[in-house]
């Protein structure tokens, strides 16, 4: 048995984007046993994944005592190959002290001795970036789609929620993600409200505004600006959120975890970009994005010296024009 360890501690979207590694290992290595080290709450989205044999948890709040507890656990597992999808100081330390003979990550200055193999980063779609870690193993696969596996009960509950939400005059459901902890990735609330009104009026699509811990006020503000055309989603954990996105006809939002969850559950997505690049968009016709196209984009920064012009000057009418044309031409929607 070949024992593999994948490390991706956070963020939620990055954890989802790392799941193709497990699928490829199971496909290419017949006796592969795949473990995945992450942190809560991201671990929720790895449960029931048939390609992952074991989910291990790192407690970031446990301090160094917690870190060394995880290291002892890793050493006891006697992994053969470790794939570190982060290469940050903590993951590098965990990798080096895990006792794993083959340790692969990305080339970063000052960490060469912590890994046995380092790969050169490339500007490719996020899961293709993760797949670079398989190069030293001579493992290659065209598979690049992240996956979340819902249980029949979770899928049933989400379908029931969709039925309860879609009352006349609505016949489509669109999940809306207006939140992000980084202001450089957050399109304004008033813009989202205007976009929701347009979706409801032209396509009879009910916008369901998503939110996570600390974000309910933003969701409520978007819904309040739609004159009753949008509703705030019920409180969910990550698996319930994924199930809700799975029963939606479309997901629209910022460059954040829900867009990757949409890909992972097979729901078309349209992303409004600020500081981030198109490299986060899954390369398929049912996933699209829009950016204003300023010279400073993409900057990948968390602060802005230009008053967030890339977001604030991206007018809702322009976004809806592109989104509407795409929905009609690509998704086959008909205006009401």
Image: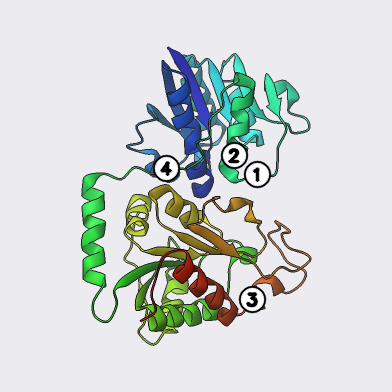
Residue 252's place in the image compared with 116, above or below, is: below
Res 85 seen here: no
Residue that carries the numbered disc 1 in the rendered image? 124
77 displayed left or right of 231 = right
Within the image, what quadrant is residue 332 found in? bottom left
Q: Quadrant of the N terminus?
A: top left
> CB atoms at circles 1 and 3 under 8 Å apart?
no
Mark before the other along the chain sequence, 2 or 3: 2
In three-dimensional space, the C-alpha distance between marks 1 and 3, rounded to whole angstroms, equals 25 Å
**Dot 2 lies on which element?**
helix
Residue that carries the numbered disc 4 in the rendered image? 147
Categorize mark 4 by other alpha carbons within 10 Å: few (<14), some (14-19), many (20+). many
Residue that carries the numbered disc 3 in the rendered image? 314
Viewer-proximal residue among 283 and 96: 283
> CB atoms at circles 2 and 3 under 8 Å apart?
no
Mark before the other along the chain sequence, 2 or 4: 2
161 displayed left or right of 66 = left
Categorize mark 2 by other alpha carbons within 10 Å: few (<14), some (14-19), many (20+). many
In three-dimensional space, the C-alpha distance between marks 1 and 4, rounded to whole angstroms, equals 19 Å
Residue that carries the numbered disc 2 in the rendered image? 128
Mark 1 or 3, closer to the camera: 1
Any mark on residue 226, and which? none
Q: Residue at x 59, y 78 (%)?
A: 318
Residue 31's place in the image compared with 330, above or below, is: above
């Amino acid at each position: 048995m070949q024992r593999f360890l994948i490390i991706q501690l956070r963020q939620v979207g990055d954890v989802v984007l790392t799941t193709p590694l497990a699928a490829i290992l199971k496909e290419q290595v017949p006796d592969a046993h795949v473990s995945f080290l992450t942190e809560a709450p991201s671990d929720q989205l790895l449960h029931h994944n048939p390609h992952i044999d074991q989910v291990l948890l790192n407690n970031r709040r446990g301090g160094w005592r917690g870190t060394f507890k995880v290291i002892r656990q890793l050493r006891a597992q006697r992994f053969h190959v470790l794939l570190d999808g982060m290469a940050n100081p903590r993951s590098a330390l965990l990798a080096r002290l895990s006792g794993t003979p083959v340790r692969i990550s990305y080339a970063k200055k000052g960490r060469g001795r912590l890994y046995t193999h380092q790969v050169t980063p490339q500007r490719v779609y996020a899961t293709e970036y993760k797949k670079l870690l398989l190069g030293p193993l001579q493992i290659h696969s065209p598979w690049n789609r992240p996956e979340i596996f819902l249980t029949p009960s979770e899928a049933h509950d989400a379908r029931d929620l969709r039925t309860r939400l879609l009352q006349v005059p609505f016949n489509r459901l669109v999940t809306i993600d207006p939140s992000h902890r980084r202001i450089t990735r957050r399109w304004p609330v008033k813009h989202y409200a205007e976009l929701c009104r347009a979706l409801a009026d032209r396509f009879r699509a009910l916008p369901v505004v998503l939110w996570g811990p600390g974000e309910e006020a933003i969701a409520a503000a978007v819904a309040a600006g739609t004159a009753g055309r949008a509703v705030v989603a019920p409180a969910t954990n990550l698996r319930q959120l994924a199930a809700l996105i799975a029963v939606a006809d479309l997901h629209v939002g910022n460059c954040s975890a829900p867009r990757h969850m949409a890909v992972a559950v097979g729901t078309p997505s349209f992303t409004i970009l600020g500081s981030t690049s198109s490299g986060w968009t899954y390369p398929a016709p049912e996933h699209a994005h829009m950016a204003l196209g300023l010279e400073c984009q993409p900057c990948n920064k968390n602060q802005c010296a230009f008053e967030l012009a890339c977001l604030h000057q991206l007018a809702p009418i322009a976004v809806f024009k592109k989104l509407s044309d795409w929905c009609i031409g690509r998704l086959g929607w008909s205006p009401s």
